[in-house]
Image (tube, grey):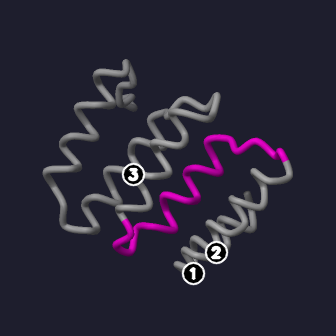
Amino acid sequence: NSVISAYAQTRKVDEAFSIFHQMRQLDIMPDSATYLALIRACEGGHLDRVWITMQQMRETSLVIPDVVVYNALISACEKAGNWKQALEVLQEMHASGVHLKSTP
């Protein structure tokens, strides 16, 4: 996860996904931190890869998106200027039973 996160911080999307695919080939199961790092790597306008990643997460992983993952998705949509998709993600989040937590 730390290598993917490092690539995410420098927006090296292809490299981050390469590490992700290598993990899968080695039967290293991704966790929510892995998916979060991939989403953050894509924030620079690679929303198509974000949606593919989320679909894979839902279909092939035991990881269930949490509030942090959904927040990263909404942020990625916002940074891409796609507010309609951000609202769809928010609706999906609520429909799946994940809710924002308020802090005092």
**Circle 1/circle 2 CB separation < 8 Å:** yes
Give the Cα separation between the discs numbered 1 and 3. Answer: 20 Å
Instruction: Answer left or right for 50 relative to 13.
Output: left
Examine the rendered structure and indicate whether residue 89 appears above or below residue 72: above
What residue would you read off at disc 2? 7
Instruction: Answer left or right for 83 relative to 95.
Output: left
What residue would you read off at disc 1? 10
What residue would you read off at disc 3? 51
Sequence-earlier tag: 1 or 3: 1
Callout 1 amino acid? Thr
Q: Nearer the viewer, mark 3 or mark 2?
A: 3
**Circle 3/circle 2 CB separation < 8 Å:** no
Q: Identify the residue shown where x is 29% and y is 31%.
A: 92
Magenta-span inclusion, residue 31: yes
The spot of residue 104 in percent (x, y) is 38, 30
Q: Could you say whether the residue bearing mark 3 is in a helix, strand or loop?
A: helix
Q: Could you say whether the residue bearing mark 2 is in a helix, strand or loop?
A: helix
Q: Which residues are magenta?
A: 27-46
Callout 2 amino acid? Tyr
Q: Quadrant of the N terminus?
A: bottom right
Give the Cα separation between the discs numbered 1 and 2. Answer: 5 Å
Q: Nearer the viewer, mark 1 or mark 3?
A: 3
Q: Quadrant of residue 12?
A: bottom right
